[in-house]
Image (spheres, coloured by chain):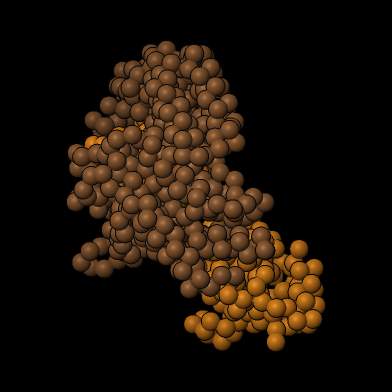
Chain colours: A orange, B brown
């Protein structure tokens, strides 16, 4: 048995994760070809690397199939109910920074706060006969945020990609999505509500609370955490 | 722990008692059209109910409660007056607390009767108290109708009153609005400049989306008008605050509320109804001298109630949900009645919790 570490399998998130570990004396690499989702760990004994899509890492942590994993705060909080009970934050990695925000058309000059959004939603429903639609893939986080803020007369519509385009296409009136620089929002004539930041996310190393850790696992874990943090 | 058949047996027994009180048994379907529930509760219901769908009927929800289907059934073909009882499963999604059941049995009793609403309130409450007799429970009561009357009678614009009424069940947003209408909260930055602007829509971004320029202009106009409205007065605000903090046994609560009515005379008819209800409860043998009344009771969780509200809670078991809840929902019958309406009051019991408390008491 070895301690399983799950890392995003592609792109900049993978590269930056690799270099974050490298700086701490642990070399992660893909074994064999670029297409193979297995990896190699050097610099510490008893840890194996598993390459996964970042979106699957929360679920794998919660199932206890991996002991450690790198993925965004947004994905952990959206996908794992009562996430604090299932995973523990080991370290924020300082990259992959993005905010989950609520944005409306920039032309809504009368809407600047959640208060305004709520008032606009009430009037919108009266005028159009349906509730104001907010496109998102983060249903749980957005609903909890809006419930907490007391916004009513809205409905969430699912959008798994190109969410910023939904307003222009009139399949939604507002969106809730991840943004890092805000550039895509501006390009699509959207603006962020002044109190519309739901969550500030970044790539984070998590430890699963789910699996049983053997004495050997615990020894490797504490050595690894010493080296990393 | 009681098993399923014990819970069902207890449910059946309780339903028989409601039948003996004159109720007709009804059995609404498990699958309910999602649209009605969404219209009523908004997006929040998705966090509380299980949603499923098919291509023909679209989204359906696993029955999250009985009141809605019973009201719909009564409004479409019920005779008057009517008393109904039911027992069966309801389903609630649980995302935060694994100890709460996602499926449990409710036994309910609902009264649709135009004569003597106070009598009907007392009838329901005392029947519930009878079903629960001997258990270590605390009863709480309230009356959403008093707060509603207070808001509807404020000396301010209909628009402000409608905004407050819309958020009666969201205490934080209600407070927010109240502070704004009382001039206690600064306007958002840039708001005055926007309202002063000759042509607020002369901006350097394209008009996109289904919310049209005319709608934006209409809201700006409404905001301009609202800016010139005097704030809600301190005496009205103070009255509302005192009202919301009333928490006493029934006779003392009534006395305190009569004092509030000096600042908020609009609540007097609602207080008269409360007084009649106290008498009706007393006539049915309820010990009102020891019955708690909280003016803010039911404000966070009981969205369709608009008058008398009540709940029974296990003493010393704050971890348990209420064993019974109920209240008056006249407005709901109007909303689902296509023009018709009828005063209605009812409630539900949880036989599983009753058995759990009995076990714990032994």
Q: In the displayed structure, would residue A134 be above or below residue B185?
A: below
Residue, x 62% and y 52% (percent of image)?
A: B136
Q: In the displayed structure, would residue B176 be above or below residue A207?
A: above
Which of the 4 image quarters holds residue B197? top left
Residue, x 60% and y 82% (percent of image)?
A: A39
Which of the 4 image quarters holds residue B306? top left
Residue closer to the observer: B128 or B313: B128
Asked whether residue A4 is in view, the answer is yes
Left or right position of B279 against A88? left
Q: Quadrant of the N terminus of chain A?
A: bottom right
Residue closer to the observer: B61 or B131: B131
Residue closer to the observer: B231 or A48: B231
Q: In the displayed structure, would residue A23 be above or below residue B254?
A: below
Left or right position of B59 against B269? left
Q: Quadrant of the C terminus of chain A?
A: bottom right
Picture coordinates of residue A71, whole percent (x, y): 57, 65
Left or right position of A37 against B196? right
Picture coordinates of residue A142, whole percent (x, y): 46, 51
Asked whether residue A153 is in view, the answer is no
Picture coordinates of residue B126, whole percent (x, y): 47, 44
Residue, x 30% and y 44% (percent of image)?
A: B112
Count of labels in the image: 0
Residue, x 56% and y 63% (percent of image)?
A: B355
Q: In the displayed structure, would residue B101 be above or below residue B322?
A: below
């Amino acid at each position: 048995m070895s301690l399983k570490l799950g890392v995003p399998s592609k792109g900049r998130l993978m590269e930056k994760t690799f270099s974050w570990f490298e700086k701490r004396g642990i070399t992660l690499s893909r074994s064999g070809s670029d297409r193979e989702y297995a990896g190699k760990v050097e610099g510490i004994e008893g840890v194996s690397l598993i390459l996964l899509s970042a979106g699957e890492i929360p679920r794998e942590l919660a199932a206890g199939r991996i002991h450690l994993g790198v993925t965004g705060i947004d994905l952990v909080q959206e996908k794992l109910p009562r996430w604090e009970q299932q995973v523990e934050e080991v370290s924020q990695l300082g990259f992959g920074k993005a905010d989950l925000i609520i944005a409306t058309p920039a032309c809504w000059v009368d809407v600047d706060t959640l208060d305004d959004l709520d008032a606009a939603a009430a009037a919108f429903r009266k005028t159009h006969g349906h509730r104001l639609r907010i496109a998102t893939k983060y249903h749980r986080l957005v609903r909890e945020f809006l419930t907490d803020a007391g916004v009513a007369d809205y409905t969430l519509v699912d959008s798994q990609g190109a969410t910023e385009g939904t307003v222009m296409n009139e399949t939604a009136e507002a969106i809730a999505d991840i943004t890092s620089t805000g550039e895509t929002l501006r390009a699509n004539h959207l603006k962020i509500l002044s109190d519309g930041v739901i969550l500030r996310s970044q790539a984070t190393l998590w430890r699963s609370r789910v699996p049983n850790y053997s004495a050997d696992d615990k020894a490797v874990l504490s050595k690894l955490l010493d080296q990393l943090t | 722990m009681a098993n399923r058949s014990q819970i069902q047996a207890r449910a059946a027994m309780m339903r028989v008692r409601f039948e003996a009180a004159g109720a007709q048994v009804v059995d609404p379907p498990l699958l309910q059209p999602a649209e009605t529930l969404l219209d009523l509760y908004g997006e929040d219901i998705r966090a509380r109910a299980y949603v499923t769908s098919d291509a023909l009927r679209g989204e359906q929800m696993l029955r999250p409660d009985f009141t809605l289907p019973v009201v719909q059934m009564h409004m479409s073909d019920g005779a008057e007056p009517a008393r109904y009882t039911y027992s069966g499963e309801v389903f609630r999604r649980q995302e935060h607390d694994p100890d709460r059941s996602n499926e449990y049995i409710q036994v309910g009793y609902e009264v649709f009767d135009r004569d003597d609403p106070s009598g009907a309130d007392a009838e329901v409450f005392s029947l519930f108290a009878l079903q629960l007799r001997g258990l270590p429970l605390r009863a709480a009561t309230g009356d959403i109708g008093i707060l509603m009357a207070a808001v509807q009678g404020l000396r301010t614009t209909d628009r402000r009153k409608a905004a407050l009424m819309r958020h009666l069940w969201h205490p934080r947003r209600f407070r927010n609005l109240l502070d704004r209408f009382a001039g206690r909260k600064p306007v958002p930055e840039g708001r005055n400049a926007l309202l002063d602007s000759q042509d607020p829509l002369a901006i350097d971004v394209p008009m996109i989306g289904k919310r049209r320029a005319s709608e934006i202009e209409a809201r700006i106009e409404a905001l301009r008008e609202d800016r010139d409205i005097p704030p809600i007065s301190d005496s009205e605000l103070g009255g509302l605050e005192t009202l919301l903090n009333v928490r006493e046994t029934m006779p003392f609560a009534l006395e305190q509320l009569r004092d509030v009515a000096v600042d908020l005379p609009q609540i007097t008819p609602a207080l008269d109804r409360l007084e009649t209800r106290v008498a009706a409860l007393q006539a049915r043998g309820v010990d009102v001298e020891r019955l708690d009344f909280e003016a803010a009771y039911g404000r966070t969780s009981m969205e369709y109630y608009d008058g008398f509200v009540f709940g029974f809670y296990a003493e010393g078991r704050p971890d348990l949900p209420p064993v019974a809840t109920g209240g008056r929902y006249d407005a709901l019958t109007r909303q689902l009645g296509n023009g018709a309406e009828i005063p209605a009051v009812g409630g539900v019991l949880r036989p599983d919790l009753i058995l759990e408390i009995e076990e714990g008491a032994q």
